[in-house]
Amino acid sequence: MRIGVAAIVLIDLCIRARDLEAHYTDAGVLSVSVLKAFGWQPGYWSIHTLSGGLVWQVVLFVIHALLALALLLGYRTRWLGLLLWLMEISLHNRNTFIGQSGDDLLRIVLFWGLFLPWDRCYAIGPVKGTRRTQYFSIATMGYLLLIASVYFFTVNLKTSPEWRSEGTAIYYALSLDQIRWPMGTWLYQYPALMKLLTHLVYYMEVLIPFLIVLPSRKQWPRLLAFALLLMLHVGIGLTLYIGLFYLINMVTAVGFIPANVFNRFKIPYRFPAMRLTVKPVWTRQFTVGLCGMVIVLNLIGNLSYCGWFTFTLRKELWQGIYLLRLDQYWGMFSPGILKDDGWYVYRGFNASEQAFDLYANIPGVDFKKPERVVDMYRSDRWRKFAENYQSGSRGYLHEPYCRWYLKTWNREHPENKMKRLEIFFMEEVSLPDYQTKPVTRRLCSACSDE
């Protein structure tokens, strides 16, 4: 699991680095001032916000990648793992409008990894610990409860008839052209199959958390939970464009796999020489106290999103949770599926007031739906930003993005510079039986190069 988590962090950094200037500098779509005015919570912090320049971000990305590589190789995983977790917090806080639930899961698993013995196998150099292939501690409970919470609370938050009675949730999810992959397009042709899969997904999510926390000496419950989780997220990854979300969920559950699976396939897992060490009593007490407090706070925080739970944490406690970025909300596709779909049109005007479609790079503007809307986004980070951008309550994102897009276009197309830009969102709301409301054109933003 340690190797997989570190590999995911490296892959994520590579994806993010493609848009380093756009997403993490003041010259991009979100300056530090706008971030702290509209995307900040009490307790948030980020060393990425100490400078809005590109060089600073490059330096931090390089350090971040080196820390992830050290975790992958198993080199001093305690201290370097701590630094990696802090870097993840800082990075995620720098642009809160491109994050998703998978980021939260990855970040919190890195926290629990600080207390788990994931440096005892496939690690560089001698490591501290015993030769046991089984391990249990309060951190183990925290890790298991974290993964169980993802599915327990997402099911409890799925309260719409689309999930619980109609069985139309997958139909509505695949109606979103912004996230539908080709495999999803194929599945979209079969309403009966989508209804069956909706109920199957719902009850799989009901079953998984109970298999995870089932108090049994047998190893099959968690192995079955891992198998169900694997099937669920492979299906999601094949049909929906959701970035690394499905991979993060699969990799962070690798810890469920029992040791006898490695034995059966003769996979070696004791590379380094180990020596037995005993932690001081105060260290064990501190660990138990800290982990126990985090478990309780996360449980109450998750329950607070359920309508039937009336107790809420004090603001001071939330500030501490935000400080460590242990906040979590597992409302994926909850309570129902988003039905507001659509696509963007970028209409530019040159010095002669001739209109151009900047996305297609052709004269004139065609407001018709592209053949594949999902292809408009070069990464899921941009898709997530576009999802936030289309929200009417986030108008503060409109002008910065418009100015960045116009500036980028003029830099990359000096032979055809634009004087003005208008960004439209063509809203298409999904209805039952493959119907939609009439498409409405909404001007999100207009700007000039002055």
Image: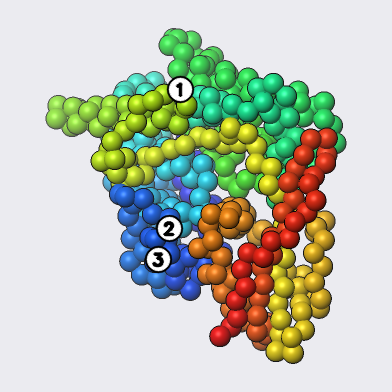
Crowding near pointer 3: few (<14 within 10 Å), some, many (20+)?
A: some
- Residue under label 3: 32
Taking 384 as reference, is 132 above or below it?
A: above
Crowding near pointer 2: few (<14 within 10 Å), some, many (20+)?
A: few
Lower sequence index among marks 2 and 1: 2
Taking 280 as reference, is 398 above or below it?
A: below
Q: Are marks 2 and 1 in contact (CB under 8 Å)?
A: no
Q: Nearer the viewer, residue 115 or 396?
A: 396
Tell me: 369 left or right of 414. Answer: right
Q: Amino acid at mark 3?
A: Val
User: What numbered label is drawn on residue 38?
Assistant: 2
Helix, strand or loop at label 1? It is loop
Q: Amino acid at mark 2?
A: Phe
What whole-number distance in Å separates the C-alpha atoms at marks 3 and 1? Answer: 38 Å
Camera sees residue 387: yes
Q: Position of residue 180 (x, y in %)?
A: 73, 45
Instruction: Give the number of marks.
Output: 3
Camera sees residue 76: no
User: Looking at the image, which residue is at 32% across and 55% down?
Assistant: 45
Taking 425 as reference, is 99 above or below it?
A: above
Crowding near pointer 1: few (<14 within 10 Å), some, many (20+)?
A: few
Lower sequence index among marks 3 and 1: 3
User: Looking at the image, which residue is at 39% across and 20% down?
Assistant: 134
Q: Quadrant of residue 373?
A: bottom right
Lower sequence index among marks 3 and 2: 3
Helix, strand or loop at label 3? It is helix
Q: Judge depth for marks 3 and 1 and give the one in front.
A: 1
- Residue under label 1: 308
Q: Position of residue 209 (x, y in %)?
A: 51, 21
- Residue sitting at the far bottom: 352
